[in-house]
Image: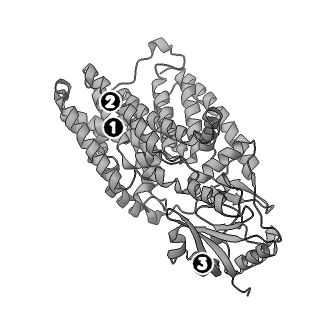
Amino acid sequence: MPADASPATVRPAPALPGPRRAPPWVRLLPLPGFLLYGMVLAFLVGGYAGGSDSSGYLNNARLLAAGRYTAAQRLVPGLAPESLPPYTHVPLGFIPNPDHVTMTPTYPVGLSLLFAGAALLVGWSLAPPFVLVAHALAGLTLVYHVGRRAGLDATWAWLGTLLLACSPVYLMMSLQAMSDVPAMVWVTAAVLAAWRSRERTWLAPVAGVAFSLAVLIRPTDLLAFAPVALALGGSRRRWTLFVLGCLPGAFFQGAFNFATYGRILITGYGYVNPEFRWAHVLPALEAYVRWLPVLLTPLGLLALGLPWLGRDAPRPTALLTTWALVFPIFYLPYSHTHDDWGNLRFLLPAFPALLVGALLVARRWAGRWTAARSWWLAPAALAILLHGAAWSRHLHAYTVGRGEKVYPLTSAWMQAHLPPDSVIAAMQVSGSLLYYTRFTFIRWDMMSAADFQRIAAASAAAGRPVYAVLFPYEVEDPAWDAFGRHLPGHWTQVGAVRQVRIWRLDTPAAAP
């Protein structure tokens, strides 16, 4: 389109042919389900400072709310911090600073900004669940509108929303304080706003804001630039407005990175992630083949037929195909992609394109008879619901949010039963101890037995008792073996909160 084209003369992007309207009851039927889904999420959501990711985001949110980007380490008195391993007093989600007494958050800043902003409205206890549930519902709404924009009628577009809502990985990541669902939401918002800016130019800067926030939440969301560029097309006006929308987020990202890590183009992850290897490609492909039919239902495999639709609507087909491929291809060499089904959460930003693309192919295959016969909607929806419920139960996707509650419960138990000057040996719960308590803690996994003996001796000299807070795997798994390899001495279990065990050091091992 020429750069000086008037908005009034811009024609909508070609859509795939098909019915555009559905009976009123079909359009309204999903609304009660949408509200019910929100209520279920609100009941099951965790939103606690737990392991590395969730505690990292929430601890960083607290720092941002206080106008800080570093935190003080809680040191054991009597020992020079530079004489100990750098991570001795640094919890999960942080890296130590060269001064040996402060530390810096590792994780990207975007989700922490959302938590800090929500805390101004609803308080810190409600901010995480509020942000998580709001993004989960927004993701469903956006997928519906992507489907409508791509040419699906309301019936088919609602099916796309149902497919996403019932995906075990979407449900699991909507119930804990992690960035995967927010990353998907803002990528989808950026692509959709850019796509619709062809008729409403004012949406181009909105696309820029959404894109910059997606990158703030997860730097790899830069990959969304490919479908966004296809959606914007060749209009200089749209591109100018898009860039203007990106600038505030880009300036903030650069300033934050420079103040926190000393470089504009570096984050807490460093320059290069050494975990990207060509050797991981084949295992990742096997994981895709095995788990994507579970997470998207077998219907999701129909997205492979998207190129078949290119003759009728080349622009939407190219956009959806690019969007559906760019994230899965990028994460093929990543070492953790194939570790566990839950790690396909990295592909969530591509799910809207995969689902809408699959439905476009399914609609073409089903033909126009679906427009005149609405009876097929009920069995299709029931099959999707049963598939999602069965797999979510099998994979324990429902329980992850409530399972995270063990972290604040453990911190509350410790504050009620342990002396406030205790020194706590921890690893898995270290981030939650920073968030919920004032205890001094040490990272047992980052020190040798000799280092711990020095800390135990210094603590005893200061009259401070030493405890350990450990998940079962930290004790029982030979790869970790906290007591056998890192914490020599005579320990007595003094408490338990669900699966977490609290131990007291009675007699330290003799110093070497």
Can residue 400 be seen from the camera position used here?
A: yes
* Residue at disc 1, secondary structure: helix
- In the image as oriented, which residue stretches furthest toward the front? 417
Q: Amino acid at mark 2?
A: Pro
What residue is at 64 percent from the left and 81 percent from the top? 490
Q: Amino acid at mark 1?
A: Leu
Can you give x and y, in whole percent of width and height, for residue 41 in the image?
Answer: 43, 41
Residue closer to the observer: 186 or 376: 376
Can you give x and y, in whole percent of width and height, for residue 300 in the image?
Answer: 30, 45
Classify 368 as above or below 116.
above
Q: Would you name the residue on which mark 2 appears?
A: 30
Q: Which mark is residue 162?
A: 1
Q: Amino acid at mark 3?
A: Phe
Residue closer to the observer: 359 or 398: 398
Can you give x and y, in whole percent of width and height, for residue 51 in the image?
Answer: 56, 57
Pointer 2 local density, CA inside 10 Å: few below 14, some 14–19, many at least 20: some
Pointer 1 local density, CA inside 10 Å: few below 14, some 14–19, many at least 20: many
Q: Would you name the residue on which mark 3 appears?
A: 483
Q: Quadrant of the C terminus?
A: bottom right
